[in-house]
Image (spheres, coloured by chain):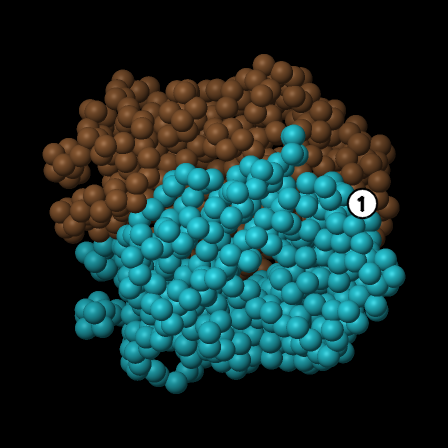
Chain colours: A cyan, B brown
Amino acid sequence: MLLKLKQILNKADADYADIRYEIKKDTFITLDGKELSNIGSTSTDGYVIRVLKNGGFTSVSFTKEEDAEKALKTAQENAILLGSNIEKPITLAKVPIIKDTFIPTLKEDPRGISIEEKLQLLRHYNDIPLAHDKIAMTNTRYFEVTREKYFISSEGAEIHEDLITTGIGGSIISKDGNLTQNVRIGAGGSDGFYTIRELDDKFEQRTQIAIDLLKAEPVKAGAYNCILNQGLAGVFAHEAFGHFSEADIVESLPAMRKKMQIGNKLGNDVLSIIDNATMPNQLGFYRYDDEGVAVREVKLLTNGVLTGRLHSRRTAHEFGEPISGHCVAEDYRYAPIIRMGTIYIEPREKTLEQLLAELGDGLYILDPKGGQTSGENFTFGAQYGYVVKNGKKDRMIRDINISGNLYQTLQDITAVGNDLKLSKTGGCGKGQTNIRSCHGAPHILMKNVVLGGI
Amino acid sequence: MEKLLDMARKVCDQAEIYYCDPTSSEVMFQKGELHDIESQFHSGMALRIIKNGKLGFSYTKNLINREEFLQNALDSLKGGVQALYDFPHTSDLPFLKTYNEHLEEVTSSSMVENCQRIADVFLKNTDAEIEVVAYKEIQNVRIMNDHGTDVQSKIGSSGYWLSLVYPGGGAGISRVYEEKIPFSVSRNTLDNLVKLYNDSSKVCEVSGGKMKVLFMPGSMYTLLWRLHSGTSAKSIYEDISPIKNDIGKQIISEAITFYDNALDDEVPGARSFDDEGVPTKRMNIIEKGILKNFFYDLNYAQKLGAKSTGHGYRASMWGGDTITMKPTPRLLHPRIEPGEKSFEELVAMMDKGIILDGVMGAHSGNIPNGDYSVGVSPGLYVEKGEIVGRVKDIMIAGNVYDTLKKVIAIENKLHPCWGGRMPAILFDSISVSSK
């Protein structure tokens, strides 16, 4: 394969060029209630060429080998056009040239397990909520995505890496009269099928939450002091802060870039945030990004001070900061963009009980239900929560969506727990979907949070 | 394709081939300067077969080996996904003008020139952080099945996505413009956007409570996703729609007519057939507030004893790769019938309120139940009929079936926006929360 890619790349008339070929294999099973609505296994493939010429850097993706010359020609023409329309020519940061093959070691390779067994396991889990009267519907799915990636560059890089992601995801919908409530469920990882075994208790717990939500009170709109559980605090780390550690986002927003200077004090002293995709056995794990750069740990925020940023080769040069190996594509349809790997809030000393006592009166809100940022503002949902009185969990609440300002909130996180947990499924949608996007945190205490209610 | 269909026909009861070949190019300006140019040349094919009431499915980007492709679909029959419907026999479809050959004249260079012109106007007249994107998309779609259906369409569009971001905030005024032919955004339109941006640049403090909210087309998907969920045959079948038993009943304001019209070829993306080859039509879902129809694909129509309404599309809420998806009921051409008022008249009708120009978090919250709770991104603040600034850290919340009962007036124009073509709608007494 690498030889074939070299033949294509040899025809490039450019200052730099690279090509990535990928075979993507999907295995999928979907159950809607008792009904099997989707099952299968299939494979697709395609190429992405990137060209740097006369100071312009562009990409073309294509699926037919015979389109390679056309793609190369288009990329070259667009690069010249780009180069002639910008003041500062694009330069890529220098990187070590890597020649390597990396096939991850899996505990129980999902590709060796029959689809019948996968279906049987999914049915088993799916039956757990469906055994309850108040559960109207489930949507559960098994997914297994293998990206077999081959990358070569005109600088001499030659890399083959496989990424195999396994997971179970879905929602459990409860109903009482015309009122419906739902909770999400997810499990999986980057290192094998074992990550989705023994989930019975988890399905039971999620089912009970969906049922309890039918009797929960809608939260009243207003501002509250809140404790966020690990899943929700992880979404904050990813959505509100993490995206602005991505150099390609912050470079398009000059005022934000000014605030996000390395060395600026942005957050409370108790807050440190790290991205570390090199941690083994986590969803976000990989070795090389899609420009052939080895990923490394980046300390983004240290005791409230901005200390690092996530980069592509282009932005690392533009910002004059070290390369980090975070330029990743969804698959062969896309040129890579800057993505977080495994981002998390570093744990401190406090237990949940200590945080609740510190909160006194407020809300304890749990588990993410989608999030979004727009510059310094963010919004995300929690699946359920509790009113806290005098440090004690009281009645259950629902319809929780919170909104805030990044800089204010970084100051308003006043205590951090000791119980770090990382997410087991991902799905960040920054133009492309990153199913390996991993985030986490311990419990955190956040002051003065705006809740929308309904 | 014909050969493959012949082969499939011999080994199963029914077969269908879906082909598409999207090509696209995109030019992006950031901070007023050219930032990136990207192109895609893709193609792919998906095969659905039915044998003994079971569905088989496979797809490929490169049809190198027909036998293997068919075998993949045959292998997936073992999964046992039920398929008791028949692929349609479709012929004599109306001719729709979905492709204009002048689109070939749109090149990367012409897109760069047009974006530069727009960026220059914005740079000169605002302090905004500017993003300007121009794009061109062309694709052929062809569907063949063993019932004699062989329908195809070439579809093309070009467009712009413009965004004026308030410095530091990230939120901004964003608009989409789309045509079937090469075009440039008029100076008048750009001047109006500049005015809207400049009028709203001051940050205002506002306390929460109930007030008038003007949902702009760019925010309407918040309501649309919930209506989509409530009226999809899939939700009806799964018994999670709160309006399942309400056909013929007044469920929202009589000012609202919510419909789907794939046949409208005045605008890009018209389709005379859906992704299952079923003819499309204009269909009222809610007519003057009365629930009239749910929308169906072949699969859910069969399960519910109804007929497909031509809404089986290979699409999802989040986009995705068409050939890898199986058809499900989707509204790809939804509209709300325009009203009588201009945008300026709607603003003049607000004593105090918020123009919801964009939202954050429309996908959070309880979509099946119709609940929404979104951050403003941005929210423009209106007092005494005039835009006086914008609000931050504010959430707007409600339930779609309740909100749509509170219509004051509807804009007299449809605008392209995420998910369809919508007017701006002014609602009364919507919950607004703040710090």
Position of residue B161 measured from the top left corner of the image (x, y, whole percent): 53, 46
- Left/right of residue A139 with respect to residue A239 in the rendered view: left
- Left/right of residue B431 with respect to residue A113 in the rendered view: right
Q: Residue furthest top?
A: B248
Instruction: Using the image, determine if residue B297 lies above or below residue A366.
Output: above
Front residue of A119 and B217: A119
Position of residue B320 measured from the top left corner of the image (x, y, whole percent): 42, 48
Residue drawn at (25%, 22%) of the image: B89
The chain holding disc 1 is A
Residue A136 in view: yes
Residue drawn at (81%, 35%) of the image: B211
**Quadrant housing residue B179:** top left
Mark 1, residues whose alpha carbon is within 10 Å: few (<14), some, or many (≥20)?
Answer: some
Residue drawn at (84%, 32%) of the image: B351
What is the quadrant of the N terminus of chain B in the image?
Answer: top left
**Quadrant housing residue B374:** top right
Classify mark 1: helix, strand or loop.
Answer: loop
Instruction: Using the image, determine if residue A171 lies above or below residue A324.
Output: above
- Left/right of residue A446 with respect to residue B367 in the rendered view: right
Position of residue B200 measured from the top left corner of the image (x, y, whole percent): 75, 46
Residue drawn at (68%, 80%) of the image: A302
Position of residue A434 measured from the top left corner of the image (x, y, whole percent): 47, 60
- The residue tagged 1 is A220
**Quadrant housing residue A389:** bottom right
- Left/right of residue A437 with respect to residue B382 in the rendered view: left
Residue A430 in view: no
Number of numbered discs overlaid on the protein picture: 1
Q: What residue type is labelled 1?
A: Lys
